[in-house]
Image: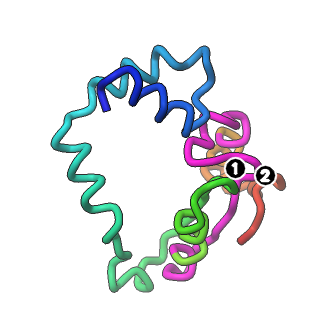
Amino acid sequence: MKLGPVLRANARALNVPAEDLDGYQDAARTTNRQAFRKVNDEAPGFRLPARSGDCSCPVLAVAGENEHDLTKGSPADIAAAFPSGEARLAPGVGHGWNGEKPELFTAMIRARVMGEPLPGELVPV
């Protein structure tokens, strides 16, 4: 993850804008190798806690529309596990959608924090 060709390939997969590539690479190089491996080892086996249904807090699960099918299906599963769960897809973007559509991401966070309706651009799942 710290070599230039690997970082550039990963940045392309995440649609990191050219003007952000240097910052992305600098940040990626600070990633602890052990932490990175642990996340990658644990991610495929992730399961929601058995008592998720006992949580009364609102939960919003969002993925990019162009994600891998497994990831794209996760928001509905996550939202269904919580009494106040909602699931949305961000249209036309992938895994790094907050960087691809920062205005939409910011509007979503602002709406959620302020208790306002989510941006209409987010597609209900």
Q: Which picture quadrant has residue 84?
A: bottom right
Q: Split into 4 quadrants, where in the image is the N terminus?
A: top left
- Left-right relation of 114 to 47: right
Residue 86 vs residue 25, the one in the foreground: 25
Q: Which residue is mark 2?
A: 119
Instruction: Tell me the magenta residue range.
Output: 78-105
Q: Are marks 2 and 1 in contact (CB under 8 Å)?
A: yes
The residue carrying pointer 2 sits among few (fewer than 14), some (14 to 19) or many (20 or more) residues within 10 Å by Cα, namely some
List x then y, in percent, for residue 27. Answer: 37, 24
Residue at left 35%, top 84%? 51
Q: Is residue 116 above or below residue 93?
A: below
Residue 103 vs residue 6, the one in the foreground: 6
Q: Which picture quadrant has residue 74?
A: bottom right
- Indicate the secondary structure of the residue bearing disc 1: helix
Amino acid type assigned to the residue bearing label 1 in the image: Ala
List x then y, in percent, for residue 120. Answer: 83, 55
Q: Which residue is mark 1?
A: 111
Amino acid type assigned to the residue bearing label 2 in the image: Pro
- Indicate the secondary structure of the residue bearing disc 2: loop
Residue furthest right in the image:
120
- Left-right relation of 116 to 38: right
